[in-house]
């Protein structure tokens, strides 16, 4: 070893020599090491590292290491002494003796709580401050969680150090969630929402904690395949029958062999054809195996379980599975009994909604208007005749099967009319749309379109457009002409009025429609009341903007003035509806939202949780209705 006057090098030399000596000789060298450990000219980290290596070289006994521990903490205040010993403890891989000395120092060091009269050792004081006062002890000072979070956020903003996130996560997941809720971008939130959807929860708008839906969802349909219906531990199975075509072929072949082979071939062919037709059309069952399984379940199990409360979930699943399957007449009486029983039990609301929705769907096979029936069920919930959650369950049952786009658009108009008839304002409708996922699909509209539709519905009795010409509102078309409404709403989702149109004009351009975007004539939509519309070539051509339309017969000049009148009405009257009707007060939404409100278990935020989304906060004014 090279001699040196540098105390740091001397300390390193002593440690190396100590570790190279046999174990029984190491204790005698401690006396020469202690002055170097006490030398403040040597940096503290180096002295702590040397002391740690020395402790690892000595026997694991308090008497062997006490002098080293004492010299390192000599002359320090109680707090700094304890911190020095903990730093030394972190540098030693394992030493029971050192752990005992650190615990002894911690027990000797007592602190007074700044919030109460408690006097406790340091370790117990840390626990006391957290459990009793929700405070953290940082560098000898107490800090609230929100204060620490602010400090870490400031550090992250200044240094952009990801370790700040880890520090906050160690403090509290709620504090980390609050940070994320206030700063996360939509792209950053997407992964959180996907994970929340997989867990079946929403995220609290204040702290991003999990908030389960206040309203449990409908159970899934029963498993149905190959004539086997199964779910909740119960199975209905139908033995597959021989396909009708194969049965008829076998009967015809047997007839041909017997008659044609033994009597006469021509007679055999005729009788074989007759046997094929008779067997195929009259003797073979028309139901598929899946339909037969559904019908069997309603015949055998459903009647005996209809009065059992514990079977409500299975019966609800059976109703959802039966849409478009099985024999409606076989289940009609049982369905009616289920509706009558479930309507008196609030906990069986899903069964009530599923059974009554199935009743309406079954009646469509006999000519009833299905969307109109669903809209009436939803309207009863909006009027208060049934719980508001009934509307969500009815829509969930209806949307459990794929629906034609035109039928769904028409149903939305019918339900909106039911909502307005129940006293909902446009602001009520949009507030209710945030309540649950299927309600959101039905009642989410652009605010300006919703205000225009509300104005049209409000003025249906007075019909201010009558001074221009006769017209049907979109609500009237949806109610009276289902097929036409589906077709027009597919072509023009923003439909407001269907105007009376000259037959020769409608034959070429289609009906004149007043829409959200203007007045639609053929493929063009005009909003400017001063648009260029005129007749050319003695009424055989119609100029709309820059497009010429050739007519099969001359058009009367008054039709041009009529179209211009609709443009002025759309611009001057309907254009004012958003301003007039969007500011109406909230009237009904507080009553409708009550069953859907959830409370965050972490921060107590009252919100409307929809699975896989950031829940919408419920404003106090919305809950109170003021």
Image (spheres, helix red, strand yellow):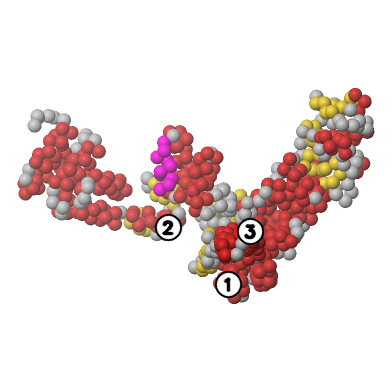
Answer left or right for 136 relative to 454.
left
Answer whether labels 1 and 2 touch (C-beta < 8 Å): no
**Image coordinates for residue 162, horizontal then vertical, percent:** 41, 38
Front-most of residues 506 and 292 = 292
Residue identifier under label 3: 266
Identify the disc placed on residue 131.
2
Q: For the residues marked 2 and 3, what is the alpha-carbon distance in whole angstroms?
A: 100 Å
Answer whether labels 3 and 1 touch (C-beta < 8 Å): no
Of the numbered discs 3 and 1, the one sitting upstream in the chain is 3
Q: For the residues marked 3 and 1, what is the alpha-carbon distance in whole angstroms?
A: 51 Å
How crowded pointer 1 is (Cα within 10 Å; few <14, some 14-19, many 20+) is rated as some
Q: For the point 56% across and 52% down, which residue is it?
A: 611
Residue identifier under label 1: 301
Q: For the point 78% across and 47% down, which residue is it?
A: 484
**Image coordinates for residue 598, horizontal then vertical, percent:** 58, 57
Boundaries of the magenta span: 161-170
Q: Quadrant of the N terminus?
A: top left
Of the numbered discs 1 and 2, the one sitting upstream in the chain is 2
Answer left or right for 214 relative to 78.
right
Front-most of residues 600 and 454 = 454
Of the numbered discs 2 and 3, the one sitting upstream in the chain is 2
Front-most of residues 354 and 580 = 354
Q: Element at badge 3?
A: helix
Main SS, magenta residues:
helix
Answer left or right for 151 relative to 278.
left
| Residue 299 position (above or below residue 132) | below
Q: For the residues marked 1 and 2, what is the alpha-carbon distance in whole angstroms?
A: 56 Å
Identify the disc placed on residue 339.
none
């Amino acid at each position: 070893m090279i001699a040196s006057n540098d105390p740091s090098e001397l300390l390193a030399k002593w440690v190396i020599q100590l570790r190279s000596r046999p174990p029984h000789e190491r204790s005698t060298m401690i006396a020469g090491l202690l002055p170097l450990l006490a030398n403040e000219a040597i940096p503290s980290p180096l002295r702590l590292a040397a002391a740690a290596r020395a402790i690892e070289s000595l026997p694991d006994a308090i008497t062997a290491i006490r002098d080293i521990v004492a010299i390192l903490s000599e002359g320090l205040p109680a707090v700094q002494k304890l911190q020095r010993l903990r730093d030394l403890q972190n540098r030693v891989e394992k030493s029971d003796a050192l752990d005992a000395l650190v615990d002894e120092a911690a027990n000797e060091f007592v602190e007074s709580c700044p919030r109460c009269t408690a006097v406790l050792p340091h370790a117990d004081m840390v626990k006391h401050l957290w459990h009793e006062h929700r405070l953290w002890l940082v560098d000898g000072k107490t800090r609230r969680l929100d204060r620490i979070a602010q400090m870490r956020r400031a550090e992250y903003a200044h240094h952009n150090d990801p370790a700040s996130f880890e520090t906050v996560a160690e403090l509290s997941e709620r504090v980390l969630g609050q940070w994320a809720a206030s700063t996360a971008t939509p792209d950053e939130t997407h992964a959180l929402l996907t994970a929340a959807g997989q867990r079946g929860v929403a995220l609290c708008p204040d702290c991003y904690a999990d908030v389960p839906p206040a309203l449990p969802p409908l159970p899934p349909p029963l498993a149905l395949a190959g004539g086997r219906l199964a779910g909740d531990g119960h199975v209905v199975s139908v033995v597959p029958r021989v396909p009708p075509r194969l049965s008829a072929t076998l009967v015809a072949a047997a007839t041909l062999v017997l008659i044609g082979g033994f009597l006469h071939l021509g007679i055999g062919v005729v009788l074989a054809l007759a046997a094929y037709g008779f067997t195929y059309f009259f003797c073979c069952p028309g139901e598929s195996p899946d339909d037969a399984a559904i019908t069997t379940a309603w015949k055998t199990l459903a009647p005996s379980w209809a009065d059992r409360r514990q079977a409500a979930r299975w019966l609800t699943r059976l109703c959802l599975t039966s849409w478009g399957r099985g024999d409606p007449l076989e289940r009609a009486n049982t369905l009616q009994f289920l509706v009558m029983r479930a309507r008196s039990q609030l906990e069986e609301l899903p069964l009530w909604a599923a059974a009554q929705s199935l009743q309406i769907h079954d009646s469509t096979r006999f000519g009833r208007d299905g969307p109109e029936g669903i809209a009436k069920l939803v309207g009863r919930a909006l009027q208060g005749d049934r719980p508001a959650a009934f509307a969500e369950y009815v829509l969930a049952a209806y949307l459990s099967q794929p629906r034609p786009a035109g039928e769904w658009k028409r149903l939305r108009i019918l339900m909106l009319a039911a909502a307005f008839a129940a006293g909902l304002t446009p602001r009520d409708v949009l507030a209710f749309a945030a309540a649950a996922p299927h309600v959101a699909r039905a009642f989410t509209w652009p605010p300006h379109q919703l205000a225009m539709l509300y104005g049209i519905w409000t003025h249906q009795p007075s019909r201010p457009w009558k001074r221009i010409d006769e017209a049907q509102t979109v609500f009237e078309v949806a109610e009276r002409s289902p097929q036409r409404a589906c077709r027009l709403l597919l072509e023009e989702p923003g439909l407001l009025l269907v105007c009376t149109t000259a037959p020769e004009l409608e034959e070429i351009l289609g009906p004149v429609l007043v829409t959200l975007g203007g007045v639609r004539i053929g493929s063009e939509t005009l909003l400017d009341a001063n648009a260029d519309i005129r007749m050319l070539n003695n009424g055989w051509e119609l100029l709309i903007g820059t497009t010429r339309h050739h007519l099969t017969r001359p058009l009367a000049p008054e039709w041009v003035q009529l179209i211009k009148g609709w443009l002025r009405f759309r611009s001057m009257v309907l254009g004012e509806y958003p301003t007039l009707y969007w500011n109406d007060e909230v009237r009904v939404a507080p009553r409708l939202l009550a069953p859907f409100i959830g409370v965050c278990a972490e921060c107590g935020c009252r919100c409307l949780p929809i699975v896989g989304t950031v829940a919408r906060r419920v404003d106090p004014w919305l809950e109170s209705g003021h």
